[in-house]
Image: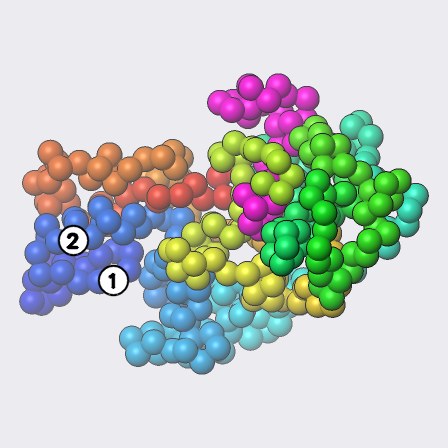
Amino acid sequence: MDSASDAHGRHKCAACFRQFNKMEHLVEHMRAARHSSHEPRCDICRKHCRSFEALRDHLGVGGSTLPKAAYCADAFAARGCTICLRVLASAAALGAHSAACRLSRIPPPMMSRALQHHQLPAATQPHGGGGEGGALALGCKMVGAGSDGSLDVCARVCVIDEQENILFEAFVKPLLPVTHYRYETTGIRPEHLRDGASTTVKNAQRRVEELLLNGEQPWKVRTSRGRARLLVGHGLDHDLDALGMDYPGYLKRDTATYPPLMKTSKLSNSLRFLTHKYLGYDIQTGHQHPFEDCVAAMRLYRRMRGQQQHPRGGGGDADAPAAATADQAFPAWRQRELERMTPEELLRLSTPDYRCWCLDA
C-alpha cells in the first residue's frame, strides 16, 4: 500500500497531512490549498504550514500546543529557536545560533537641520541583492488632517538601502492643513513642517521616485524591471497614496501582505509584532521614527528572502510564475490522471498563489 495511505485506504496530503476517503477529494484539496515547497515547514515532522503563525502554533511557541504536534513541541522546546523557528542539532548549537538570530535595535539618527532632505549622490548609492537594482525600504509617518484629525497625511519620509544607510529623509509639508500632529507617537511639531524646515510633497515624491527607478523610464518599469529597485515596506499602498505615488505591484515587497507573515489569509500582523517575534527586538516605543520602520521591514524582507525551508530546485514550483493558477496546475481535463498520482507527485505539481521572496535572491 502507498506510504501516504493508511490501512483503511485513506489518502494523506503530503504537505499538511490531512486525510481523505477518496483520491478525488485529495486532488480537490490540492487544487484549493495551493501547497508548495515554499511554505514554512516544521523541521521535525516536515509538515507544511500556510504561515509562520500557523507554524508557531504547531510547534507550541507561546504555550499553544496542538494535540497531534506534542512530539514536535517537546523537541522544539529543547532545541528550537523561537525567532526563526528552526530546530538545531543540540542545545549547544542553539545557544550559538540564538545569539546571531536575535537582532538588536538601531537607534534612529538625530537629524539636524543641516541633514534634512538628505540624499546620497547617485554614484555612492549601494546596490545590494534582490536583483540588479537591489531593494530600498520606504517608511512614512502620518499626521492628522480634516475636522477631526483622522485623515492621514504624510509629514515625514525616509528611504534606506539594504545596508540600512539613509538615502533620503525629510519632513514633508502636507497639502492639507494639519489639525492633529499626533506628537505622542510622531514627535512632530508645527515648526518641523514650516517653509524652510520641510520639503513639499511633490519634491519628496520626485526624490523617492528617482531612487526607485534608478535611471529607468517610468513607462518601461510597468512591464520590465531593468535597473529599477524593489520597494520594501509595511503597508506600502498607504504610504504611496500619502505621497501621491504609484509603483508596479510586481516590484513591491510588503511585509503586511506577504502570506507567510500574515495572521490569517485576510488579516495582517503589525510591524511591531513582526519585529518582536521574528527579529527579536521592540520598535515604535515613544516617539516613532520612520527609519526604525524602514530597518525593521528591510530586515524582515532579507530574512524571508534567505529562508531555506525548502530545497532549491527540489520542487516543481521553484521557478514557476506567481500568476500560475490552480486550474493550470490541476486542470479538470487531467482529473483521472491526477487521481492516479501519488500525493508526493501532486505536491510537486502544486504552485503557490504568491511569489516567494526567496526567488529574489
Quadrant in the picture for residue 5? bottom left
Instruction: Please name the residue shown 70% across and 40% down the image.
Output: 175
Q: Amino acid at mark 1?
A: Phe
Which of the two residues, 182 or 168, is positioned nearer the viewer here? 182
Q: Is residue 290 visible?
A: no
Q: Give the residue at mark 1.
A: 17
Whether residue 359 sits left or right of residue 44 in the image: it is right
C-alpha separation, residue under disc 2 versus residue under disc 1: 11 Å
Instruction: Please name the residue shown 73% across and 57% down the image.
Output: 181
Residue 108: give x, y in percent of width and height: 79, 56
Which disc is residue 322 wearing?
none
**Looking at the image, is 28 positioned above or below residue 281?**
above
Whether residue 282 sits left or right of residue 187 in the image: it is left
**Looking at the image, is 191 positioned above or below residue 44?**
above
Please provide the residue range marked out in magenta: 211-240
Which of the two residues, 88 or 354, is positioned nearer the viewer here? 354
Query: What SS does tag 1 mark?
Result: loop
Which of the two residues, 94 or 226, is positioned nearer the viewer here? 226
Quadrant in the picture for residue 272? bottom right
Which residue in the rendered view is the most extreme toward the front? Answer: 147
First in sequence, mark 2 or 1: give its number: 1
**Looking at the image, is 195 positioned above or below residue 32?**
above
Instruction: Please name the residue shown 53% across and 70% down the image.
Output: 82
Whether residue 221 sits left or right of residue 115 in the image: it is left
Whether residue 208 sits left or right of residue 258 in the image: it is right
Q: Give the residue at mark 2.
A: 26
